[in-house]
Image (spheres, rainbow, N blue to C red):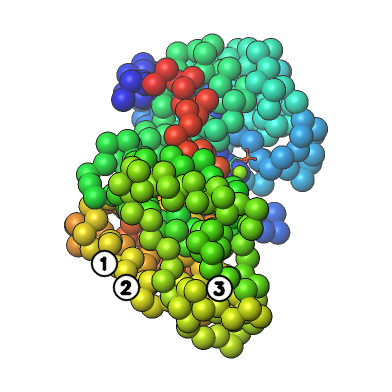
Amino acid sequence: MAWKTLDDMDLAGKRVLTRVDLNVPMDGGRVSDATRIDRIVPTLKDIVAAGGTPVLLAHFGRPKGQHVPEMSLRPVVPALEAACGLPVTFAADCRGPAAAAAIDGVAPGGVVLLENTRFYPGEEKNDPDLAADFAALGDIYCNDAFSAAHRAHASTEALARLLPACAGRLMQAELSALETALGDPVRPVVAVVGGAKVSTKLDLLGNLVGKVDHLVIGGGMANTFLAAQGIDVGKSLAEHDMTATASEIMAKAEAAGCEIILPGDVVVAREFKAGADNETVAADACPSDAMILDAGPQTVARIAATLDTAKTLIWNGPLGAFEIPPFDTATNAAASQAAALTAAGGLTSVAGGGDTVAALNQAGAAARFTYISTAGGAFLEWMEGKVLPGVAALGG
Ligand code: 3PG
Ligand code: MG
């Protein structure tokens, strides 16, 4: 990797401005899923062990440049302290005297958390003045927020250019997993892409067909591909205005030698609800008053056979309506298969983006995947082949 890491920096006695992603789910004022917090702990511990003070910069929600009390980062403090086992001092501002005073007052071995960077409009504008105010608070910049690296914001982009900059441990882990999965993967490579809409994953599919050997398409977007082949998908979710685009992606895949795997059989129902009456039919036999809600068992078997021969898997999005059982069956089966192959040592499996982690957790498969990204949008943009501004600014 071309960018520096914490190992390249002299951290002793330094204030290390560390961009983290604390955009975590909250329920009743408490953190309900601490995954993102747990994953930054190695960075905080390594900085403290080297004699530095982590000064955390983070956003929460989308306050649009206003001071929105409900989007304060203060309620995250208890979960952060519990995760890292270090005392956390909260500063009610992310710039200026209040921030400086909190940093000056912290004892060695402590962590400072600054208030939501998005309370200032300059954050999302990548404002050099705000970045300069951040820089004045520290000696070194460490970006550990891969999941916010698709944003060119003052705390993710401009600031990286004002101080000696490095990647944190989570950023390193994310980048190395992604490089393993798509940068320089061991072949054959399978991508599983699901989700509702082709329109949101167009660039991603276009990029993947040039890079992977097999592309499994599931979820609502598979219906658009079926429709593009002239198949009547009944009342299924499908973007009928995207069928020409789907055809182009199929042609591009064929030219690139990428096999696209679409459902050959499907589970259909007349109602979109858990436990709805359902039947399994051939993909071209969806009744006109029914909708496709999952891939069928023959499709699952074909996906399993493809995974059996694969060496690398990259997964984004569920294969069916996984939130309403039994239409989570194909997602669960394919995820379990991938997890088992990974645990047996034959497969490197990387997953991320949006609903993916929830689906793999529900399948009980996430813990056995090689790597689960903390990123949503950033994972998708990276799968699209885009350069992420927060990574580029590290000089990598
Ligand atoms: C996320 O939760 O995906 C990241 O923190 C980025 O948040 P954003 O989509 O509001 O920029
Ligand atoms: Mg997002």
Label 1: how many Cα within 10 Å (few below 14, some 14–19, many 20+): few
Q: Position of residue 384 (x, y in %)?
A: 47, 38
At x 43% / y 40%, what residue is drawn? 207
Residue 96 is marked as: none
Along the viewing direction, whichever of 10 and 148 lies nearer the viewer: 148
Distance from Cα at disc 2 to Cα at disc 3 = 17 Å
Distance from Cα at disc 1 to Cα at disc 2 = 6 Å
Label 2: how many Cα within 10 Å (few below 14, some 14–19, many 20+): some
Q: Can you say whether 174 is above or below 7 in the image? A: below
- Secondary element under disc 3, as helix, strand or loop, is strand
At x 63% / y 30%, what residue is drawn? 114
Q: Is residue 116 left or right of residue 144?
A: right
At x 28% / y 61%, what residue is drawn? 307
Q: Which residue is mark 3?
A: 293
- Secondary element under disc 1, as helix, strand or loop, is helix
Quarter of the view holding residue 133: top right
Q: Is residue 340 visible from the viewing direction of this image?
A: no
Q: Which residue is mark 2?
A: 301
Three-letter amino acid code of the residue under disc 1: Ala
Counting residues from the start of the chain, the first of labels 2 and 3 encountered is: 3
- Secondary element under disc 2, as helix, strand or loop, is helix
Q: Position of residue 59 (x, y in %)?
A: 64, 36
Three-letter amino acid code of the residue under disc 3: Leu
Q: Are marks 1 and 2 in contact (CB under 8 Å)?
A: yes
Q: Which residue is mark 1?
A: 305
The residue positioned farthest toward the front in the image shown: 230
Three-letter amino acid code of the residue under disc 2: Ala
Q: Ligand 2 is located in which of the four quadrants? A: top right
- The reply to whether the residue tagged 2 has its Cβ within 8 angstroms of ligand 1 is no
